[in-house]
């Protein structure tokens, strides 16, 4: 008895009508392959057909004309501050950049309890797909507070158990912020012990290095040691060289990455395309002064001897690290206790108080800021050649390090609105630092592979329909340090899980995103 050959498994899909047909665009599939003209058809949230010849428009419920535009996988942001997600569930500042998946919980600050937080996000709905890392600082704080000491065996066991729990609940790995409290008090062997737990479930390790200025080489070396000792993939997150004394030293750090990779270690990087950093104003304060929290800091600041030591530490950082040697390089981003300071510099603050613009007076204003409740700042302390050199490296993904933002709230770093379009507009079209093909790879397949996300990050039949349509001639960031609350130009269409999230350049209000949970696997 003879049997007819079985039909290919996708014949039924290809014969069916499409929900969305993206017609006539230049398709960049994210793999680094050259673009080609074609159509992309979507049904039930998946890409069901890619054709180099035109598909029937009559077969689609909705047709998007992509003539003269690029069709790419939705961008994957490896480092996103999603803290306001339950308050800003639309995540419009991300989606309108073409971001369809964002990885939260960076710098050691992941949510806890982990599963309960993810359930809350699912219940609220989200405009962007979200994945999360478990945060070392969060866990250490829960177990040990802000103590500057090594954990007891019982405490280390508790922390390891919390990492294991988060991994079982869907974390994609562990993050550290070794420049921040309380991670700065952790020795390398503690970080290795916790990272091994993440590695056992197939997770990754991302690190805000212990130092990114004068201690940069030691910080990179520690991350490489963790990659080796914990047998885990490591991402040097928002990689940079802070302060004028370190400008140009990205040559050495990139050589360290290359050497580690040649030795068989999986060390990668991510980066945002700006010459300014952003974090809390406490980054200017020596860590020992912050041990124990706000009340302990206030007691030290009231002691003349200790205050003098704190001042000297801040002056050193103002001259050599995040201060960039000039009070004008420190800009206030959000100051809840005095909104008039937002957008102003530390120089402006000192002048407002009728003081000379000396590092010592700047330090006094930093102490005053912390005593009043703190602030976030922007630090103009990076060098453009370092930014370009790091960006060119084949193992650097593009990532925003941006906080979800909404117009009218503070003076945030423009990366929260403009990272991805800025790369496409400035570093591809205007400067030629990257080719368009490689830029898209660094926004899609490279970050997807970094977190082992298999069903997103490429344009391929059967994968999730996270897609962005942009105009390579006009795509650009509009957000600036002086006027940050501006959405980008040249990104007319974004699809999240096959649903239109941005239509003709406007956010639709559809919360089409999903909470992504990693399935734990043994190594």
Image (cartoon, rainbow, N blue to C red):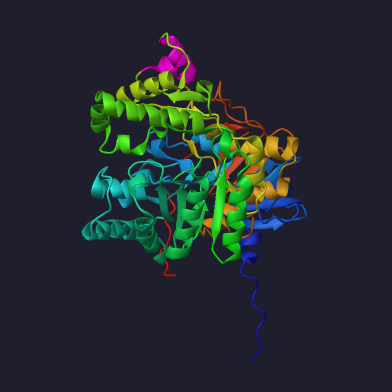
Q: Position of residue 352 (x, y in %)?
A: 43, 10
488 with respect to 193 (left or right) = right
Rendered-image quadrant of the N terminus:
bottom right
Return the residue nearer the eye: 66 or 166.
166
Q: Position of residue 44 (x, y in %)?
A: 54, 53
**Which residue is at 45% across, 31% downward?**
316
Q: Decide whether residue 349 is among the magenta residues.
A: yes
Q: Decide whether residue 72 is among the magenta residues.
A: no
**Which residue is at 42% across, 56% downward?**
173
Rendered-image quadrant of the C terminus:
bottom left
Return the residue nearer the eye: 320 or 250.
320
**Which residue is at 75% across, 54% downward?**
34
Return the residue nearer the eye: 386 or 473.
386
In this view, the residue farthest toward the front is 305
Span of residues in magenta = 338-353
Q: Position of residue 74 (x, y in %)?
A: 59, 47
């Amino acid at each position: 008895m003879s049997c007819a050959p079985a039909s290919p498994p996708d014949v039924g899909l290809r014969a069916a009508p499409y929900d969305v047909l993206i017609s006539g665009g230049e398709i960049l599939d994210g793999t680094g392959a050259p673009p080609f003209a074609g159509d992309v058809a979507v049904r039930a949230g998946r890409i069901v057909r890619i054709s180099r010849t035109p598909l029937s428009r009559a077969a689609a419920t909705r047709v998007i004309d992509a003539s003269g535009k690029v069709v790419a996988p939705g961008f994957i942001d490896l480092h996103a501050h999603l803290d306001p997600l339950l308050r800003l569930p639309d995540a419009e500042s991300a989606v309108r950049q073409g971001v369809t998946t964002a990885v939260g919980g960076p710098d050691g600050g992941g949510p806890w309890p982990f599963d309960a937080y993810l359930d809350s996000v699912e219940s609220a709905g989200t405009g962007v797909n979200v994945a999360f890392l478990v945060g070392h600082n969060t866990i250490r704080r829960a177990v040990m507070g802000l103590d500057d000491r090594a954990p007891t065996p019982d405490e280390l066991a508790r922390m390891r158990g919390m990492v294991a729990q988060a991994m079982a609940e869907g974390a994609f790995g562990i993050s550290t912020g070794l420049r921040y409290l309380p991670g700065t008090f952790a020795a390398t062997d503690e970080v290795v012990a916790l990272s091994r737990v993440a590695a056992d479930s197939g997770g990754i390790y991302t690190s805000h290095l212990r130092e990114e200025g004068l201690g940069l080489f030691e910080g990179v070396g520690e991350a490489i040691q963790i990659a080796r000792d914990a047998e885990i993939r490591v991402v040097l997150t928002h990689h940079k060289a802070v302060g004028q004394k370190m400008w140009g030293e990205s040559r050495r750090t990139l050589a360290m990455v290359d050497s580690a990779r040649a030795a068989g270690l999986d060390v990668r990087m991510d980066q945002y395309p700006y010459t300014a950093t952003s974090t809390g104003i406490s980054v200017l304060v020596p860590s020992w002064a912050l041990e124990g929290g706000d009340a302990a800091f206030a007691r030290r600041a009231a002691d003349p001897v200790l205050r003098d030591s704190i001042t000297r530490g801040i002056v050193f950082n103002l001259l050599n690290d995040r201060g960039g040697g000039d009070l004008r390089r420190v800009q206030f981003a959000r100051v809840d206790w005095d909104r008039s300071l937002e957008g102003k510099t530390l120089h402006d603050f000192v002048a407002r108080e009728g003081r000379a613009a000396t590092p010592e007076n700047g330090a006094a204003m930093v102490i005053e800021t912390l005593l009043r409740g703190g602030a976030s700042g922007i630090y103009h302390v990076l060098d453009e050649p370092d930014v370009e050199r790091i960006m060119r490296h084949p193992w650097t993904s593009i990532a925003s390090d941006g906080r979800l933002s909404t117009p009218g709230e503070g003076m945030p770093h423009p990366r929260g609105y403009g990272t991805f379009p800025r790369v496409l507009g400035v570093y591809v079209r205007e400067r030629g630092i990257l080719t368009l093909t490689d830029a898209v790879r660094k926004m899609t397949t490279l970050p997807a592979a970094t977190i082992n996300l298999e069903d997103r990050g490429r344009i391929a039949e059967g994968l999730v329909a996270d897609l962005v349509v942009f105009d390579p001639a006009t795509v650009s960031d509009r957000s600036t340090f002086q006027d940050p609350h501006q959405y980008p130009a040249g990104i007319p269409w974004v699809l999240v899980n096959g649903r239109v999230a941005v239509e003709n350049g406007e956010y639709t209000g559809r919360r089409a995103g999903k909470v992504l949970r990693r399935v734990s696997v043994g190594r």
